[in-house]
Amino acid sequence: LHPTPPHSTPTAMEPGPATTCESDKDESTQRLIADAAETRPNPQGVPLPWILGGLGAAGLLAVLVAVVPRFSSTQQGPPTPSSGFLQGLETKDSSSLGGSSPEYDTAWKAAITGTSCQDTQLTPKDGGTGGVITCQFEGGLRHFKFPVGKFDIDEQVVVPAGTTIEGNANPNSPDDQAERPDPATQTFFVATHGMTNVHAAYCGTEGRMQQGDAQRLRIGFLLNSNTVIKNINYQGRDTVRPYDNGNLCGGGVFETPGCVSPGFGDGVGTGWVNKRQGCYDHTGHPNDLITGDGKGVENVIIDSVRLNELFLPSSPSHWDLVKGQGSQVAVWVAMTQDGSATKNVQVKNLVSMLTRGDGINFHGNVQDSVAENCHIENTGDDIYAFWGAYGENPSGNVFRNNVGKNAGVTRNYGYGVCVAIYGAKDLTVTGMKCYDR
């Protein structure tokens, strides 16, 4: 563990001698290779010992950059929970957000989840004539362009294969990713409800969920093959991380199809390398809970998106972040039901300002995927995580030129590091900058 100083000087993984298991790797990058099977700890608000297990001569390589600042004596006390804090799902719409941008209900979903490609005239919540969602076929693929406005989203919306969703303008400044965009130019998707009950069933552990339940809880987008989502803002409403999601199973703004449950995670994973068929909860019990068809996808692009900043003050205090509204995870690539690979997921120029769990997590048999030029702050767990677990061939993946800041704050620094690797065959981490605040 290498804590950064109290000021905001980054701990940077700059080019230099690399950690490597092979002698012929380029020393200009941090090459992290392990032929291993590994399970992930079960963080539920307090630091837990690592459960490290591996296979083969290479064993397990786990590299962590810790960013755990001390508390200041000037920090305020914890917030008083609202009346809906433990009511499960707190339901709202975007009509109370204020501002001059048009506000729309969830009628837009029909255009995306269907198969046709035609322009859609929108009607604002307050009546009148709104903007237009345009659609064009480009190379046989549907390309939807959304206008300025705030769009309600109330479930995990399936984005069919061959579909692009584009908002009105890039929300992230090339000069300073932390700079907020002008909302009058932006497309927002705003969750209508969020998790407020730490005791809620979330991952299907020990049969406590039915097929379809997860899709009502994981507000965001399920991305199939050959999909693109770009130039949008998203705002979640989760105020807690359920205990059932302690051994992380998802809840990403952007997810790929796979198991609802995380796979076995309560011990060394050596005995699980030949159990790549089926979905399992973290205790090892099987279930049939999936998102989409549960199989791997390929060619997914998430580009220039901004998450969970709409409700934050411009200079949030510690307790603004602890009680703030967000999503469980920014990006979750799920372990697949049949063990098939998810390939070529590209996450570029993503900015996330508050999550209850990880920032980005590539889980299972993820191959040839990259997260680059991203800026993630204020997580409740690890910021950039690769969790190959007992996937067959988690290889060819890269975390490049990313920034991480204030890991673990939304759960009072009970857990969370800047970069975490829980089992991989081939992963490159290079140009990483981590800040404690």
Image: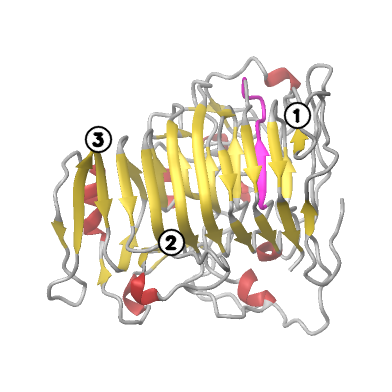
Q: CA distance from mark 2 to mark 1?
A: 34 Å
Location of residue 136 in the rendering, given as x and y in whole percent from the top left corner: 19, 46
Element under disc 3 = loop
Element class at badge 2: strand
Residue 3 appears in the picture as rendered: yes
Q: Is residue 114 left or right of residue 89?
A: left
Q: Which residue is mark 1?
A: 33
Find the magenta span and give its range.
383-392
Considering only order in the chain, which callout, 1 or 2, is on the residue closer to the N terminus?
Answer: 1
Q: Main secondary structure of the magenta part?
A: loop
Kindly identify which numbered label has been placed on residue 139.
3
Q: Residues within 10 Å of mark 3 (few under 14, many from 20)?
A: few
Residue carrying label 2: 234
The answer to whether 264 appears left or right of 221 in the picture is: right
Q: Which comes before the other along the chain, label 3 or label 2?
A: 3
Marks 3/1: CA–CA distance? 38 Å
Determine if the magenta segment contains residue 41.
no
- How far across and down, in percent of the image, does residue 330 sit? 53, 53
Taking 419 as reference, is 39 above or below it?
Answer: above
What residue appears at the point 14 percent right and 48 percent down from the top-left corner?
Answer: 118
Residue 166 horizontal/vertical position (percent) = 33, 54
The residue that appears at 77% across and 28% down in the rendered structure is: 25
Which image quarter holds the C terminus?
Answer: bottom right
Residue 416 to residue 76: above or below: above
Q: Position of residue 153 (x, y in %)?
A: 34, 58
